[in-house]
Amino acid sequence: MRLLDLYLARVLLNQVLLVLGVLAGVFMFVTLIDQVSYLGTGRYSLFDAIQYVLLSTPRIIYEVFPMAVLIGAILGLSLLAHDSELIVMRSSGVSIGQITLAVLKLGLVLALTALLVGEFVTPWSETLAQRTRAEALERNIEQKSNSGLWMRDGSTFVNVREVLPDLTLREIRIFQFDGMDQLRSLVLAGRGRYADSFWDLDEVKQTLIDEQGFTQVSQAPKARWNTPVSPQTMAVFLVQPDQLSLLQLRKYIAHLGANVQDTRNFELAYWSKLALPLATAVMLLLAVPFVFGSIRVGGMGRKLFIGIMIGIAFFAVSKALGYIVLVYHMPPLVGASLPTLAFAAAAGLLYRRIP
């Protein structure tokens, strides 16, 4: 059985990697086309667009992984059936259950791979992709991982610790320098919200420094900050769910809840990360009935076409349920797990039809 496991794993893995490469290439091309529309904005160039696409590749691979596993497994098993290798296995006393178990072992390896990519590779690469893109689009703003955003407006330097999902700014510091590069004013604000072409600052403390170095401190519950920096500019630097690991998502969801922010988008990402490894295994098992079940009528091309349609359906339903969660306040756990559970049930029904 060990030889059978290794042989099936090698055949299926080769096809999965082939399909994954094709799908990733298609999605990378679409992403590049989308980024072309930003050329000329700030200092965003074709090089920046290509760099963004390359850094986004782990996220793209992670998102299409279940679909690639399904199509690749159907292709691999169909090739074995076409070459009569599955018939030879059955004639040698290998049961469908044993073949399924061998496929499941590969599924566990692929599920673990998906989990590791989603936890360690995708957050790092996506954070770098979003940061380099944002800084290229907004030439006067720089993002530092340990201190937030830094921007310059003439002789004024501004630091924003965090941009919340509703575009509220947290922990704002405004440094005003004179012509001799001497600090003359420091404004600290707890929060900032955009309204009527101004940023309304809360919990404001201002320190004025004269030429002799004497300071004058004043406090106010509110103040207005007049700056060309718009909410659209700040939106470029929002934290995206793809940039966070499971542990970081849990902490950020708690952080957003403490700041009275909508957490559904990040909760959806959290449960989707947990569901994706299981979806990978389910997609692999779903491929087995295509060869052994009543659905095997027809050639390899027909099976592959049906597999592609099912893979696209899974991808589309997952995305659609994500939008439904956000628009209709559906529980994120249900939206993230429903496609996987539905396809797992479909796999179970198809197995029961295997003669």
Image (tube, helix red, strand yellow):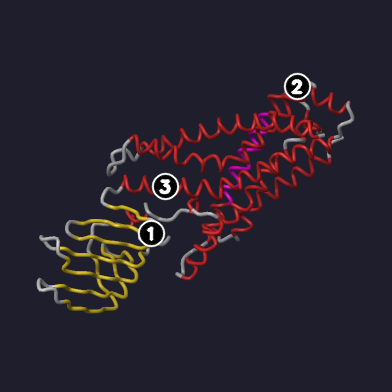
- Neighbourhood count class around disc 1 (C-alpha, 10 Å): few under 14, some 14–19, many 20 upward: few
| Circle 2 residue | 82
Residue 176 placement (x, y as % from top left): 19, 64
| Circle 1 residue | 146
User: Do residues under tags 1 and 2 come within 8 Å of each other at their CB atoms?
Assistant: no
Q: Residue 106, located in which quarter of the rendered image? A: top right
| Stretch in magenta | 304-321
Looking at the image, which is closer to me, 207 or 66? 207
Rendered view: 156 above or below 6: below
Numbered marks: total: 3
Q: Main secondary structure of the magenta part?
A: helix
Q: Residue at x 84, y 41 (%)?
A: 352
Q: Is residue 65 magenta?
A: no
Q: Judging from the image, what secondary structure is the residue with disc 1 in?
A: loop
Mark 3 residue type: Leu
Residue 172 placement (x, y as % from top left): 31, 66
Report how far apart the C-alphas of labels 2 and 3 lie in the structure.
Answer: 45 Å
Of circles 1 and 2, the one toward us is 1
User: Do residues under tags 2 and 3 come within 8 Å of each other at their CB atoms?
Assistant: no
- Of labels 1 and 2, earlier in sequence is 2
Q: Judging from the image, what secondary structure is the residue with disc 2 in?
A: helix
